[in-house]
Image: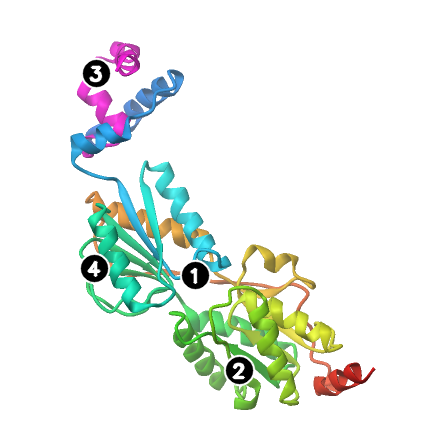
Amino acid sequence: MRLHFSVFEEVSHLGLTPGTVSAALNNSAAARSIPEHTKNRIIEAAKTLNYRPNFFARTLRLKRTYTIGVIAEEIGDAYGSMVISGIEEYLRKNNYFFLTVIHRHDPKLLQTYAQMLLTRGVEGFITTDTSLSEKLALPTVAVAGHQRVEGITNIILDHTRAARLALEHLRDLGHEEIAFIRGQTMSSDSTVRWNAICEVAQQLGIRIRPELTIQLEGFDSTPGIGYSFTKRLLARKQPFTALFAYNDIAAIGAIWAFHEAGLHVPQDISVVGFDDIPGAAFASPGLTTVRQPLVKMGQIAAQTVVDLIEGRGEYAPEIAIETEFVIRRSTGPANANNRRPTGIRQKTMSQ
C-alpha cells in the first residue's frame, strides 16, 4: 500500500481525492466522469512510480472477475490463433483476463465448457468458428457464428463480396474451368461461403461442375488436408486451369500436390485461397487470397463484449467486416494448351 500512497502524494498538487486517483488507476466505472487529461496525468505519475493495480484486491472490492470466456474450435489452426491474438491484445491492454476452451464441434463439450466458464466467474463470452443455437447467460460475441440468435453479436464478413473479388479475378484472367475445394461441413463459415460462391458464379456465367468440386473432411488444420484432397481431385482426371480453395491452409497444400504432379503454379493452374494467414505470402509461389482481417476481428469482438459488460455499448445483432483481395504470384492467365493437368501428372508418374 505504501506505493499506492506514493501515487496519491505524486498527484496531490492536482487537488484530487484518493477516490479519483483509485478510479483512474483501476479504470472503474467512476473513471468515466474524470476528464481525459486528468486521467492521463494520473497514469503518467503511476508509470513513473512503476505502480501496478492489485488485480485480486480490485476483484474483491468491485465483486468482478474481469475475465472473458473464449470458446474456440481449435487453438493451433492459423485462423483461430490470429483471432485469439487480437482478443488477447485488446483484453491485455484493458486489464482483462481470458480463459479458453476448445470444443472441436462437439455439442456436448460446448455445453459443458460454457457451464464451466460460468462457474469460474467469466463476465462474457467470445466464440470463434462456433455455431451457437441459443443465447448464453452473459454478453456474447461470435466470430464467424452466422446463426442469428437474440442477444448474440455476430462478427460477419460479406462473403458475397469476397466470392466476387476472387471469381472476377479468375474470370478476367481467362479461366473458365475452375475447381473448388469446399470447407468442412462443421465449419461455421462453410455453408455461407459456398452459397455466396454459387450465387456469384451464376451471375458471372461461371459453371460449377460437381466433378471439379471436392469437400474437405476431418480435423486436420495443416496444409496436409489440402494436399490429400487435391490429389483426389486430380485423380478424377478432369480438366481445369484454376482452383479456388476454402482457406489458405488448403490452398498451400494444393500447391504442393500440383508440384508433385509435375504441374506449375500459375503456369498450368492458378490457385486462390481465403484468409491471408501469415504463411500465405511465403508460400511458393506467394498465394493470391481473400484477406480477412483476423486480428482486427478478434480485437473488435473483445472490445464489443467489454463495452457490453461495462455498459458503454448497445447490443447489435451484427458487425460487418470488409474483405480485401490480395494478388500474389499464384495466379496468372489461363493457358489454353494446359487444360488437362492430369496428362502431365500421368507423364510424371510414369518416369
Label drawn at residue 136: 4
- Which residue in the structure is indicated by mark 3? 16
Q: Amino acid at mark 2?
A: Ile
In depth, the one of 139 and 345 nearer the eye is 345
Please tell me which residue is depicted at 52% across the width and 71% down the height of the picture: 165
Question: With 347 as the anchor, is 18 left or right in this view?
Answer: left
Q: CA distance from mark 2 to mark 1?
A: 27 Å
Q: Quadrant of residue 306?
A: top left
Q: Where does the image place residue 325, in percent across and percent down from the top left?
A: 54, 64
Q: Amino acid at mark 1?
A: Glu
Q: Which quadrant holds the C terminus? A: bottom right
Please tell me which residue is depicted at 58% across the width and 72% down the height of the picture: 226
Q: Quadrant of residue 185?
A: bottom left
What range is drawn magenta here? 1-30
Q: Residue furthest right?
A: 351
Depicted 147 relative to depicted 120: above or below: below
Instruction: Report if the CB atoms under discs 4 and 2 are less than 8 Å apart.
Output: no
Foreground mark, 2 or 1? 2
Q: Where does the image place residue 180, in percent across and percent down from the top left?
A: 55, 80
Q: Amino acid at mark 4?
A: Leu
Q: CA distance from mark 3 to mark 2?
A: 67 Å
